[in-house]
Image (tube, rainbow, N blue to C red):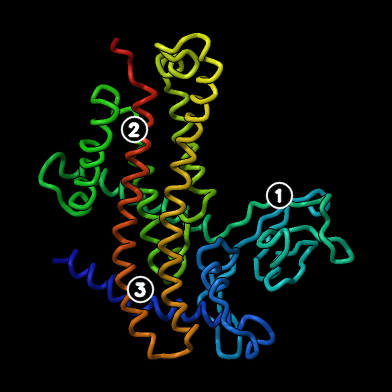
Amino acid sequence: MKIRLFAYFVSALLIAFFPLELSGQAEHVLHGSENQKEKKFNPSEFILEHVSDSHEWHILTKKNGESVAIYLPVIVYNKKSGLQIFSSRKIAHGHEYKGFRLEEEGEYEGRIVSVNENGLIDKDNMPLDFSMTKTVVGMLAAALIGLWLFLSLARSYKKTGISYPKGIQKFLEPIVYFIRDEIVIPNIGYEKHEKFMPYLLSVFFFILINNIMGLIPFPPPFGANVTGNIAVTMSLALFTFTIIQINGTKNYWRHIFATPGVPFWLLPIMIPVEIIGMFSKPFALTVRLFANITAGHIIVMSLLALIFIFDSLAVAPVSIIFVIFMDCLELLVAFLQAYVFTLLSALFISLAVAEDHH
């Protein structure tokens, strides 16, 4: 009963705040410049502002064009200025601060650059950027939530032992068993599954939590498009790739560099093909997760943009109904993409650790 009430509460919040948050983003696009009344609504800018990373968490825009945002810390280092830490408010809207500027257009759009005394980009003194962005905050929040969930599960087991599940056990235990019994053991095998369970569980919940957090519009740390950032999905894929290479058996490497049953004269052709196949696996993991999550966000934002394109409240009810429907599908996709990434990772690992039975 409590879980059902909580689900209703979350759904009500989503329905209530999602249009409000996105209308705020739309006004930010409409009124963000000094010529706010003359500037037409740009749907591409509206959509990209949501799916891209940022140094600030935009909440809403007032009628006078003033933005209400949470500005994140900027941490940069270059040879001239050394290590500098300050709020991103200092360099928002094209302002310069301590020889740094956040570029809003051109080759370095979205990047913090060093500028010289004339206000030009100093390409010989570009900074190392360790700044906190929406994606970074979202990842840290997801990691803390995952840590809290599993520490709570550990405490629950410590108190009750292996008994009738209570509290957080009721939610997590079926998912853990599903991953173990339906993904890891069937692919990797019972003898070796325990070695890879911690990683596969971690990557599943990390992706799942970030996917769900990205659907909740009110920030922070919600609303960040973490798994729609290709750098994040590439990093996750590289973790899987590294585990595969470290744990690959002799049989795995033999199939790459001396494929059984292949004539010697074909090896110069087969070896490059196998090496390409080895690197195509993390590429497939990267693009699959990134494309599916980003596409969902773009569809939702496009539906909401229709309200501002037609500039009519009559379109709003239809648009909001479709958005709520898409959000329900996105919730399914959030679980599905976490499942697919974990399943493919387990499958690729199984190919590397399989023993030759011939």
* Labelled pair 2, 1 in contact (Cβ < 8 Å): no
Q: Answer above or below: position of 272 versus 74.
A: above
Provide the secondary structure element on which disc 3 rests.
helix
Expressed as whole percent of the image width and height from the top left, the position of residue 248 reads 43, 21
What is the distance, in whole Å, between disc 2 and disc 3 at their CAs?
Answer: 35 Å
Which label's residue is closer to the chain start, 2 or 3? 3
Provide the secondary structure element on which disc 1 rests.
strand
Q: Residue at x 39, y 61 (%)?
A: 213
Q: Answer above or below: position of 188 versus 75.
A: above
Q: Amino acid at mark 1?
A: Leu
Which label's residue is closer to the chain start, 3 or 1? 1
Tag 2: Cα neighbours inside 10 Å, few (<14), some, or many (≥20)?
some
Residue named by callout 3: 323
Q: Answer above or below: position of 236 versus 136.
A: above
Which label's residue is closer to the chain start, 2 or 1? 1
User: 182 or 74: nearer the eye?
Assistant: 182
Q: Can you name the residue that lies furthest to the right here?
A: 118
Relative horizontal placement of residue 22, taking residue 72 as reference (left or right)? left
Residue named by callout 1: 128
Count of numbered circles on the image? 3
Relative horizontal placement of residue 22, taking residue 183 as reference (left or right)? right
User: 198 or 119: nearer the eye?
Assistant: 119
Residue named by callout 2: 347
Q: Answer above or below: position of 179 versus 8.
A: above
Expressed as whole percent of the image width and height from the top left, the position of residue 187 reads 28, 30
**Quarter of the figure with residue 180:** top left
Q: Amino acid at mark 3?
A: Val
Expressed as whole percent of the image width and height from the top left, the position of residue 153 reads 25, 46
